[in-house]
Image (cartoon, helix red, strand yellow):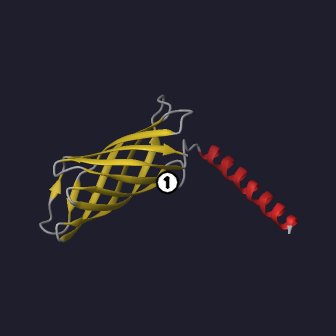
Amino acid sequence: MKKKLFSLALVGFSFLGLHNQVSAQRGASYENGVGLFIDAGNGGTYVGPHLKHYFNSNDAGQVMVLFGNSQTLVGAEYSYNAAISGADGLKWNAGLGPQVIFGHGTTDFLIRPMVGLEYKIPQVPIAFGFDWRPAWQLTHGNNFEAGRFGIALKYAF
């Protein structure tokens, strides 16, 4: 039994070492980030947890659950991220994703394009971002709101 546990631990640490080597080779400043997201602008403010995961050095996915205005917003998005030359830790990003808002007796579906900046503090596991993220509501009136912005603060690991 001890041999099996030792072998399993050895394989696990080998994969962890390989994972760290691959992460270093691909140039990602972090792989996962979890923290607080604020969606603010015309139409109210929503606040809640979010998670961002880098699939490689440029492609990332993000999910969030935000609360505000007696509503709950659930969203997911893809973003392309690229480093800004000469600015260590600073990336620009652009993306798109669906969101659903529950509350006030209705359910609304939105498409959210976004473009922004993200800064990962070098040598510190903290990242923050600022995005312009207009909202295109596809239900109950087909409304477009350009004045929406996102602020993210996350622990990056």
Q: Secondary structure at mark 1?
A: strand
Measuring from the top left, give residue 61's x and y in whole percent. 44, 56
Farthest residue to the right: give it. Answer: 3
66 shown above or below 119: below
Query: Residue at image x 87%, y 65%?
Result: 3
Q: Which residue is pictured at 81% across the width and 64% down the height?
A: 5
Residue 84 occupies quadrant: top left
Residue depicted at x 30% and y 62%:
99
> Left or right of 3: which side holds 75?
left
The residue at which mark 1 appears reads as 53
Indicate left or right for 40 with 27 as reference. left
For label 1, count other residues whose C-alpha is less than 10 Å away and answer few (under 14), some (14-19) or many (20+).
Answer: some
Question: Quadrant where the N terminus lies?
Answer: bottom right
Q: Looking at the picture, which amino acid does disc 1 mark?
A: His
Image coordinates for residue 36, horizontal then vertical, percent = 38, 47
Front residue of 115/121: it is: 121
Count the labels in the image.
1
In the rendered image, the vertical position of residue 130 relative to residue 100, given as above or below: above
Residue 119 image-quadrant placement: top left
Q: State left or right for residue 51 relative to residue 116.
A: right
Q: x%, y% of residue 4?
A: 84, 67
In the image, farthest residue toward the left: 141
Q: Position of residue 156 (x, y in %)?
A: 51, 44
152 or 136: which is nearer to us?
A: 152
